[in-house]
Image (cartoon, grey):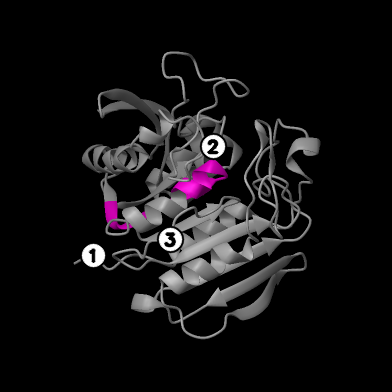
Amino acid sequence: MTRWLLLLLLLGAPASAEQLTHDGIVRDYSVVAPAGVTEKLPLVLVLHGAGGTGRYALNTYRWADRALTDGFIAVAPQALPPRLEEPAQFRTNPAYWNDLSGRGAPAHQRIDDVGFIAAVIEAVRGAYPVDPARIYVTGFSSGASMTHLLGMRLSDRLAAIAPVAGRNWIAESPASPLPVLLIYGDADPLHPFNGGHPRTPWGDGPLETPIDDVATAWAKLLACPGAPVADRLAPAVRSLRWDGCAAGTEVRYLVVEGLGHHWSQGKRDPLPESATGPNSAALNTTETIWQFFRSHPRVVP
């Protein structure tokens, strides 16, 4: 164990509150980073779900803990609510990402969240020792849909992405192919696994196709050859893997049986299971994503 990591374990790594102005709007993001480190570190961006906050995502999905123990920088940008002039509130004015799905308030659909997150990456790179070959994005629900979009729109600076329980609403081939890890529960009422109308805290959503379509869409976008390899990562975790995709990338698709709309092995979800479906500890989501990320650095010209 290095001396700086031992010091972190003793002192902890509280999240710092940061701001930047993008498109004339002051935007927030939280950072957990080792102090006094000069070596280049991986950067993991963590995108919260609808109605959530960046700090909540860092803590509930255990990325703050993971950054502390494994020595990387974790950053959680904050989405905006539809009515900017009012405080964000889960039920009546929830913060969520403009993932280009066309859902939500028309004014919110003009928010440039891709540009905001690109600006966050540059701000963090200017203030912290970030390894440009190891910049990753993960997110949950609305944050997962935003992660899909970033994988297509910011592929020139990302090494890999890992959306959890969120759909891909558009299909654009990334300019720079990148590895993709997808994680879904097959008992998720907010994104029905076999397709259908989702039940959300804000009402029923539009008809969705089966979740398998999300994985096959990425396999097509990355020109993955042939059929995927099927396996079991754990007794209740099915795995499909497409290898040999464009530029040597891969698509890995994990389905957690009996899991609803949750970050498996995250901290306690405040919403009742009547709204989110059953929880499960079948998969350590954060550990699985981090191991995927660390095995996929980007080749930087």
269 left or right, relative to 128? right
**Residue numbers of the magenta segment:** 131-146
Using the numbered discs, state the Cα–Cα distance from disc 3 to disc 1 in whole angstroms.
25 Å
Q: Callout 3: 10 Å neighbours few (<14), some, many (20+)?
A: some
Residue 57's label in the rendered image is 2
For mark 1, what is the residue? 300
Describe the element under mark 2 as helix, strand or loop.
Answer: helix
Residue 105 image position (x, y, % from top left): 48, 29
**Residue 33, located in which quarter of the rendered image?**
top left
Q: Which amino acid does label 1 sit on?
A: Val
Task: Please name whichever residue, 100 or 142, is drawn nearer the observer in this view of the structure.
Answer: 100
Q: Callout 1: 10 Å neighbours few (<14), some, many (20+)?
A: few
Q: Is residue 35 above or below residue 129?
A: above
Residue 233's label in the rendered image is none
223 left or right, relative to 63? left
Using the numbered discs, state the Cα–Cα distance from disc 1 to disc 2 in whole angstroms.
29 Å
Q: Is residue 240 above or below residue 71?
A: below
Q: Callout 2: 10 Å neighbours few (<14), some, many (20+)?
A: many
Describe the element under mark 1 as helix, strand or loop.
Answer: loop
